[in-house]
């Protein structure tokens, strides 16, 4: 795929309505198949299934081939999820999926106090078509508020818990034994993105420190975490930090490789999307100003260097995506989750091509309407749009709530459903993607900011009871 790129026509997988609070994500999709392998070889084959988390509905498994709902776990109306549910697939000797595990963190529910909000994890067993309810359910409280869950990060199937404050927890499958690491970044930090790193042969050239390569050879995984830290002296000013961690399965521990901040001159407006290219070892960011930046992830070569270094190698302006806010008076809305709830979403395809989903003006190089929802591929070598497919949405979704608020109120998520790298560490020729689009007309933090939510609640003289979302999930290959 290095010299060419394409997108299949996106096909609608499912459409539903989700109900959330004014700060929760409405829905998200996760892969059933592992996106990275904790062992050197694998018997796994693509299952063509996806895990859908829907607020107010529950957790479902859909077939990406025929859009059928294969299994569904419903929850009481009081239950709200803190992050997308995740699937840990266990395979038989023949390579088929056997009894597997589902994990989800709860933001609220019966028996969960406000103090424990976002800290409780449920785990249950999926036995395939014979499953009945939440079998072998386990409940555990795992530290502070949870940003994301990542199962199967070691050969023993450990669960990685990424907390909103930047701390990490490594737990066994039964959620009993745990290792915790506090956030290495000083100040009041907030995680906005993370990714478990696959390790290709070419990436080892970027991580050539003996310390790091020894960990990789020992069967460990790496995790990359992006945190935002508020400036203590200047309001509405933030610094972004990238931290690299090694997850040691043999020792059941997490070790910080290093942390570094992104120079403000390289990130003049906030990032709305972030991706890591496992084949080349580069971090990509797309800001609300439409600036796409490539950073090489390097390790320090002397005691005077930081343990890790981000070296900017490319900057391209991608025009046409809508701005983050309606006018200059409202101020930028802080994106709190670049993985599951942002106004733009992105994933790396190759060193040259990147897939971006968002709301795009139908007028070339413009930011005003009319608008359409699109899945695009951009050629970073020439800084141009390479391919584009429309995501079919109801016309009302692409209109603003009023003349004053003319922008479509949409959030996006791109979730790879297949690995960026093959079993031998080489780049795959084709990647399956799920694209989640959510629309609301209600006040919500991801679109209006937390201050606007508070004002709306005060004007109503009561706490907002809920936000209604329309959600569509599409699947495509790129």
Image (cartoon, grey):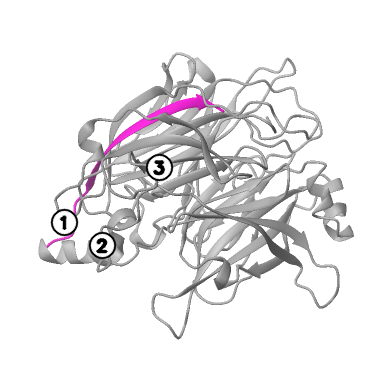
Q: Earlier in the sequence, mark 2 or mark 1?
A: 2
Q: Which residue is mark 1?
A: 404
The relative height of residue 129 versus residue 110 in the rendered view (above or below) is: above
- Residue matched to label 2: 327
* Residue range highlighted in magenta: 461-478
User: Is 188 positioned to the left or the right of 168 in the image?
Assistant: left
Compute the Cα span from label 3 to label 1: 21 Å
Q: Residue at x 56, y 46 (%)?
A: 383
Q: Earlier in the sequence, mark 2 or mark 3?
A: 2
Up-down: is 398 above or below 391?
Answer: below
Question: Would you say 101 lies left or right of 79 here?
Answer: right
Q: CA distance from mark 2 to mark 3?
A: 19 Å
Image quadrant where one finds the C terminus: top right
Q: Is residue 158 magenta?
A: no
In terms of secondary structure, where does tag 2 sit?
A: loop
Residue for badge 3: 358
Q: Earlier in the sequence, mark 3 or mark 1?
A: 3
Which residue occupies 45% across, 86% down?
Answer: 233
- Badge 1 marks a residue whose secondary structure is loop
Seen in the picture, residue 416 relative to 71 is either above or below; the reply is: below
Q: Is residue 464 magenta?
A: yes
Up the image or down, 130 lies above or below 277; here it is above
């Amino acid at each position: 795929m290095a010299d060419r790129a394409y997108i299949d026509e996106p096909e609608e997988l499912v459409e539903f309505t989700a109900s959330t609070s004014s700060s929760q994500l409405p829905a998200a999709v996760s892969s059933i198949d592992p996106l990275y392998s904790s062992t050197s070889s694998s018997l796994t084959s693509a299952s063509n299934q996806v895990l859908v988390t829907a607020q107010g509905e529950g957790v479902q498994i859909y077939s990406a081939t025929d859009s059928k709902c294969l299994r569904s776990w419903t929850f009481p109306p009081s239950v709200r999820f803190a992050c997308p549910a995740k699937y840990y697939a266990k395979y038989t000797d023949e390579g088929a999926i056997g009894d597997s595990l589902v994990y989800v963190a709860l933001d609220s529910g019966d028996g969960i106090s406000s103090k424990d909000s976002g800290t409780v994890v449920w785990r249950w067993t999926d036995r395939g078509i014979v499953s009945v309810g939440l079998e072998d359910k386990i409940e555990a409280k795992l530290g502070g508020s949870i940003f994301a869950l990542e199962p199967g990060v070691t050969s023993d199937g450990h669960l990685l818990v990424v907390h909103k404050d930047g701390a990490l927890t490594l737990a066994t499958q039964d959620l009993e034994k745990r290792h915790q690491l506090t956030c290495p970044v000083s100040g009041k930090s907030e995680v906005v993105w993370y990714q478990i790193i696959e390790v290709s042969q070419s990436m080892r050239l970027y991580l050539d420190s003996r310390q790091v390569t020894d960990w990789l050879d020992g069967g460990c995984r790496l995790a990359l975490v992006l945190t935002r830290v508020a400036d203590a002296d200047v309001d509405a000013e933030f610094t972004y930090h990238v931290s690299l961690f090694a997850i040691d399965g043999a020792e059941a521990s997490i070790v910080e490789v290093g942390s570094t901040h992104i120079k403000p001159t390289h990130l003049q407006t906030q990032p709305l999307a972030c991706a890591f290219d496992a084949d080349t070892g580069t971090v990509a960011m797309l800001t609300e100003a439409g600036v796409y930046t490539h950073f090489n992830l390097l390790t320090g070569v002397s005691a005077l260097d930081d343990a890790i270094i981000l070296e900017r190698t490319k900057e391209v302006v991608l025009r046409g995506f809508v701005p983050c806010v309606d006018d200059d008076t409202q101020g930028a809305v802080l994106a709190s989750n670049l993985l599951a709830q942002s106004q733009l979403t992105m994933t790396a395809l190759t060193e040259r091509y990147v897939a971006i989903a968002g709301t795009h003006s139908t007028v070339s190089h413009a930011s005003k309407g009319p608008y359409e929802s699109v899945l695009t591929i951009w050629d970073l070598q020439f800084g141009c749009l390479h391919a584009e497919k429309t995501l079919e949405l109801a016309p009302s979704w692409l209109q603003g709530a009023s003349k004053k608020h003319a922008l479509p109120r949409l959030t996006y998520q791109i979730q790879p459903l297949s690995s960026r790298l093959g079993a031998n560490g080489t780049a795959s020729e084709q990647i399956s993607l799920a694209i989640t689009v959510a629309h609301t007309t209600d006040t919500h933090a991801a679109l209006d900011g937390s201050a606007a939510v508070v004002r709306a609640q005060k004007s109503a003289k009561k706490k907002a009871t809920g936000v209604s979302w329309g959600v569509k999930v599409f699947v495509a290959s790129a």
